[in-house]
Image (cartoon, rainbow, N blue to C red):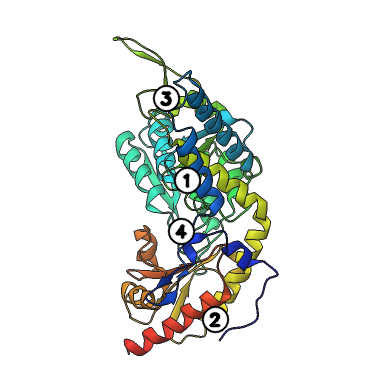
Amino acid sequence: MTQPAIAPFAVEAARADFPLLHQQINGYPLAYLDSAATSQKPVAVLEVMDQYYRTINANVHRGVYTISEAATAAYESARREIGRFIGARSAKEVIITHGTTEGINLVAQSWGRANLRPGDRILLTVMEHHSNLVPWQLVAAQTGAVIDYIQIDGRGHLALDDLDRLLNERTKVVALTAMSNVLGTINPVREIAERAHAAGAVVLVDGAQSIPHLPTNVQELGVDFLAFSGHKMCGPTGVGVLWGRRELLEAMPPFMGGGDMIRRVTLEGSSWNDLPWKFEAGTPPIAETIGMAAAVRYLQGIGMGTIHERESQLTTYAMDVLSRIEGLTIFGPPASERGGLVAFALQDIHAHDVAALLDRFGVAVRAGHHCTHPLHDLLGVPATVRASFYLYTTEEEIDRLAAGLLECRRVFA
């Protein structure tokens, strides 16, 4: 089934940067096809984090001794570097979080509780990850706001014909994913943001799946908030970023209280630190932030346009190969309209059984509802198998996936 390589991309050179990929699983070379859940980490990221712990491991913003000042400089330099990566106008707009989920919760609880009133509308989409559903359900219950949903059409696109009907003077916030973690759909964020702003709403984007794979500039997107995670973009776990427009962040109350987010504390009350530290209570993920900046440098060294082009070619290849398998249903739009992942169902075989059998052959895929219960309800399946790709994925690994699926059909026939 193997075909000639379809991209003039030095994939083997890239793979050499990722130590974890070079191992055997159940006697087979590992085929890691779960990068949408978490990406692998290049040596450049591992080394910079190791160097931090070996040489300048100290808390930031607190010490006046040498290694604490060095740690603070490295941490704030990382913030600036990440901010430039997404086109932030100022590092003060870059809030370090522990991931996309925390960033969305921050906006929902801080901006949402300060601005939403009974009867106000929150507009989401039915393809959202639970991280961009549950926080809004919580704040709706707290404030009396009501949630509306943009539906999807039969091809896995958002049904934007309904957008003007859903947007009205009571709509205060629109929150959506830039790219579906199940369908792979790349949403027209800028168009939606323009229409939302015309209605007077602010716009939050879940960039967990898009930032690692697509060139992104928040000014060009025209949104108000953007949350994303380090671990999906070759960085470490436990760190992420919330970018927000400075005027909105300035007006928002703190999300958490504690050290470093205060200016002055008395027994009667407290005053808050400046941006961005107002939203960074407690010791931040210092080594992880430095590692995330190293991941940014690594990705920029390859080029985000190059990464997106390579993944588009891999996705086209995968959908062509998988579509030949009898009884396999692929969900979502054509390859040209999606990111680097394919979610599917194989006959009536449960997704977990498929994934478990594939693991016997060293093929690692995701199985389940992928934190999108409502979307899977719409698709009419309890779970899907998801294969997701990144710059280190090869066509041969996709061929092994297909061969494993044929074996699944034989075993469960």
**Residue 267 place in picture, x, y as percent:** 29, 10
Q: Amino acid at mark 1?
A: Ala
Closer mark to the observer between disc 4 and disc 3: 3
Q: Which residue lies under the disc numbered 3?
A: 253
Dot 1: element: strand
Between disc 4 and disc 1, whose residue precedes? 4
Q: Which residue lies under the disc numbered 2?
A: 321
Q: Residue at x 39, y 86 (%)?
A: 407
Dot 2: element: helix
Q: Which residue lies under the disc numbered 4?
A: 151
Q: Amino acid at mark 2?
A: Val
**Which of the two residues, 396 or 228, is positioned nearer the viewer here?**
396
Q: Residue at x 66, y 75 (%)?
A: 6
Closer mark to the observer between disc 1 and disc 3: 3
Spatial CA distance of label 4 from label 2 is 29 Å
Q: Within 10 Å of the Cα at label 1, are there few (<14), some (14-19), or many (20+) other Cα atoms?
A: many
**Residue 139 place in picture, x, y as percent:** 34, 38
Dot 4: element: loop
Spatial CA distance of label 2 from label 1 is 35 Å
Q: Residue at x 63, y 70 (%)?
A: 313
